[in-house]
Every structure is written in C-alpha cells, then in structure tokens.
Amino acid sequence: MSHSKLSIIGIGEVPTGIYPDRSRWDIIYDTCMAAVKDAGIHKNEVEAVVTVAPQAQPDIYGEISFGKIPEELGLKGCKNVCVCNAGGASTSNCLRLAEQLIESGAARYVLIPHLTVHSTIPLPDLINFFAKAGIDRQWEYPYGQTYNGIVAMMTQRYMHDSGTTAEEMASVVVSLRKWAALDPNSMFYKKEVPSIEKVLASGMVASPLHKRECNVLADGGAAMVVTSAENARARKSPAAFKLGEGSRFFSAFTTTRDYEKTGTDMRDATMEALAQAGLITSDIDIWNVYLAYPVGHPLLMDLLGLCEPGRAGKMFMEGHTAPGGKLPWATIGDAVGRGHTGSGVSIATYVDTARQLMGKAGERQVPDVKYVYQCTSGGSGMNFIASIWGRD
C-alpha cells in the first residue's frame, strides 16, 4: 500500500445553477469559509492559496492572480498564492502544487478554490471563447469546429467500434441524471430523470449527439482544504487520503491525436495509479469519472476491462452504474448531471470523492466506501490524470 502524503480535510460548495445576480466574490466567500470551517481550522492557519483558474472570466482571473483571495478573506497566515490553469485538469494540478508546498514545509494547510459564473458572460464572448479554446487555429477554427462536433465524431467512432447502440448511449445520460437528482448541489436536484426515449427525442445537435447528451453551461463554485496525511491522521477527523496517481499527455488538439494511443495511455495512467496504491480494479468502490460528455464513460469502462468488451453501454442500460448499482459511477453525474461549470466540474468531482469517503454524501452515500477512483482531463481532452483516494 502506498504511503499517502496528502489528504483532503475540508470541503465547501455552492449549488450549481444560473445565478446572474450572485457575485463571483460571494461564491468565493461562501465556498472558502465552508471548507475552512469543515476542516476545523482557523482561517489564519491557511498558509497557501492555490486557485483553479477561472475560464473566460478575465477580470476575476486578474484579481485572483494578484492575490485578492487571501486579502479579501483576511488569511493573515498566508505566505504563498498562485493560479493554476490546465483546463479540466486544473484541480489535479492544484492538488499536486499543494502537495509540494506541504511536503517542503512551506505550508501546513492549503486552500484550493474554484468559481465559474457563466451566466453573466456576454453570449458573444462565450461563443468566441469556446470556439477557440482547445481548437487548432489553422486546421479547425476556420471551419467552425465545436466541442459538440468533436465529441460527436468521437462518439460515432466508439459506437462503430464497440457496437454500442443509441439507446445504450442515451442510458449513460439517464444514469448520470439519477445521481444528479439526489444531489442538493446539482442544478437537476429533485428534477425528473429523463427516460432513454426522452433523451433520443431531444433535438439533434451533432449526429449522433442529441441535445440531452450535451452540456448546459452553469454557475458554481467549490473549495477544499488539504494538509499532510500525517497531520490528518493526528487530527482523527474524517478525511480523504491520496494513495496513487498516474498521468499522460496526448496532444493539444484532436486533429493531431492518435485514437488508439489515447486509449492505451488512459489505461496505463489508471494502472499506474492503482499500482501506487497497491490496489486492483476490483478494490474500487466508486468510479468518479469526469469526462464531460457521455461517450467517455462507456469508453473508459471498456478500456479498463471493467466489463466484457463492448458491453459497457449495457452496463449503464441495465442500471449497474446508477444509485444502488454494483458499479457506482460518477456520483455527481459529471457535467451532464451537474451543469458544466468549466474546470469546476473536476473540483466538484474531487469534493464528492472526499464527501463519499468522509460519509457525508446524504442520499447518494455509497455504503462502506473504502477506495475511490478519480480522473480528470483538460482542454480538448489533451491529457488524462487518474488518482486513487481512500479513507487511509
């Protein structure tokens, strides 16, 4: 078993939704104060703030870059501040930076916040941002390529190779929304879970992706307090311990990506993380996957050999991945069930990994959780970071 060096001891989150009247700083205050309180420390014990970079929000990005968070929160013990941007993999890298600060003795407690308020960004600015982010300016952008278009082609390829049907792909959405319907922090909390028929009856966006298989942009925020595993154990409070990690970089753009190698690298990164933790796939109690669109979920399940080849779609369709199933999968419902808050979906997934291990997940609590798999990916899917977390 790996000797963990990092642990999450405090979490804070605001519900995802559309809040045009709520300020960005309001969200930062609420999530950071909640995380510090949950950690059971005084705010002045925070010695570093490592923030996930807000996407398409240059004003708040600038304020945070110049250290306004510790100033606004009055963190009198803060000695280090920085912003990290790796798209959807930003949180993973914030945790790595925090681990280095803690291990070097530069900080005992590190605060990691994120916020996104898409609803107040002018529509032309949003369109322009997503038209260029992760899109090759020479070979994709001039032809109007979009993320929906890119993922549609990936989905078509996966369905062709695996034999996955449109109904099975739609069942991924149903599974994710079942988790979301039980999550007070989801914009779909207590809302009707669409049937497979409803998913397939929604408008076609980019074949074979229907409207309900794509993401809704939303506002949200979360924060975590992390410390050394040694300190967390001494405190004898519920915590989530990092046990192993593996990562791979693919390519900046989808046009230059080797499809087969990408799959191999995702599998290898996962196996590295498991090996560091001294575990195998059957030891994992929850698979907390952040891959933004439905196709990533059966694709990863197939790659990791968690089912018979080509049967991943059926696993979702038969309910094995939904609440109460034998393979709990993406317990916040990923971006499809949470609402897409940019890089915020990955921090929300980490927060829920900690919440599940701490036994604080309410209706969504998976019984007897001991080990959770967590993955993130950045930008256009440029990379893949897998990690294993445990109760210790």
Image (cartoon, rainbow, N blue to C red):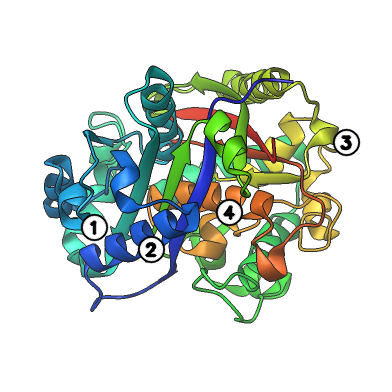
Q: Nearer the viewer, mark 4 or mark 1?
A: 4
Q: Are marks 2 and 3 in contact (CB under 8 Å)?
A: no
> Looking at the picture, how far across and down is residue 199, in whole percent?
63, 69
Observer able to see residue 210: no
State the quadrant of the C terminus. top right
Sequence order check, earlier mark of 2 and 3: 2
| Vertical side of 2 occupied by 93: above or below | below
Residue shown at 21%/50% (left/top)? 69
Q: Secondary structure at mark 2?
A: loop
Foreground: 382 or 375? 375
Q: Earlier in the sequence, mark 3 or mark 4?
A: 3
Q: CA distance from mark 2 to mark 4?
A: 20 Å
The circle on residue 308 is: 3
Q: CA distance from mark 3 to mark 4?
A: 28 Å
Q: Secondary structure at mark 3?
A: loop
Q: Is residue 366 above or below residue 147?
A: below
Q: Earlier in the sequence, mark 4 or mark 1?
A: 1
The dot on residue 126 is 1
The vertical placement of 224 against 324, above or below, is: above
